[in-house]
Amino acid sequence: MITIINYGLGNVRAFANLYRRLNIPVAIAARAQDLDGASKLIVPGVGAFDHAMELLNGSGMREALDDLVLRKFVPVLGVCVGMQILAGSSEEGRLSGLGWIEGRVRRFDEATLPQPPRLPHMGWNDVVPKGGSGLFSGLERDSRFYFLHSYYFDCASNDNVLATSEYGIAFGCAVRSNDIYGVQFHPEKSHDYGIRLLKNFAEL
């Protein structure tokens, strides 16, 4: 069962509808008790880091999610801000993140961006996966995904970088630590590439 965390941010219905079209069982969790039976988790998100953490901490699901991910090793995929809150902290805010993957979320330096400097990074961009991850099976070459962000996940260890993209600089656009995954781009808006990635996650 793919369980999508509905804590007030992200296009929850888009993920649910996509999985239903793939005939993959899916549920939406808005309370801790809704997490019963989850075999995989998706944490979507849009907007600011602190706002996301305030909503998640206030949802009543934080303790249950920590238990599922850190002690029961249920695979999880964070998307966009849902990826960023996997980190310990962010330059965007003051609150602590989930800390499930060691690293810090940083703002793009406008001095490195194409002229004229533009934030957010918005639109389609190439994604280059590292080898050896089933999340990008079939997406190893010529894959493109839709981005909308001004901050990126700076992993403490390059070993946790699963894929890279470029916007002025090369940056990690997908991360992994064991069964914890995150992608900065929006697979639910990325057409066939996104469908393949979400199907891959269901099959990990």
Image: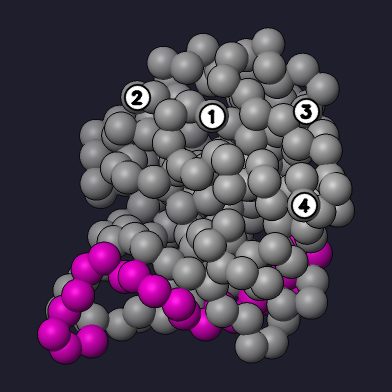
Q: Residues within 10 Å of mark 1 (few under 14, many from 20)?
A: many
Q: Which residue is mark 2?
A: 54
- Type of the residue with mark 4: Arg
Q: Which residue is mark 1?
A: 6
Q: Which residue is mark 3?
A: 38
Q: Are marks 3 and 2 in contact (CB under 8 Å)?
A: no
- Tell me if 71 is positioned left or right of 183 in this view: right
Query: Does residue 132 appear in the picture of this structure?
Result: no
Q: Is residue 100 found inside the magenta-colored segment of the image?
A: no
Image quarter where the N terminus lies is: top right
- Tell me if 5 is positioned left or right of 45 in this view: right
Foreground disc of the pair 3, 4: 4
- Type of the residue with mark 1: Asn
Q: Name the mark on residue 21.
A: 4
Looking at marks 3 and 4 on the same chain, the residue that comes earlier in the sequence is marked by: 4
Q: Residues within 10 Å of mark 3 (few under 14, many from 20)?
A: some
Q: CA distance from mark 1 to mark 3?
A: 14 Å
Q: Are marks 2 and 4 in contact (CB under 8 Å)?
A: no
- Tell me if 27 is positioned left or right of 202 in this view: left
Q: CA distance from mark 2 to mark 4?
A: 32 Å
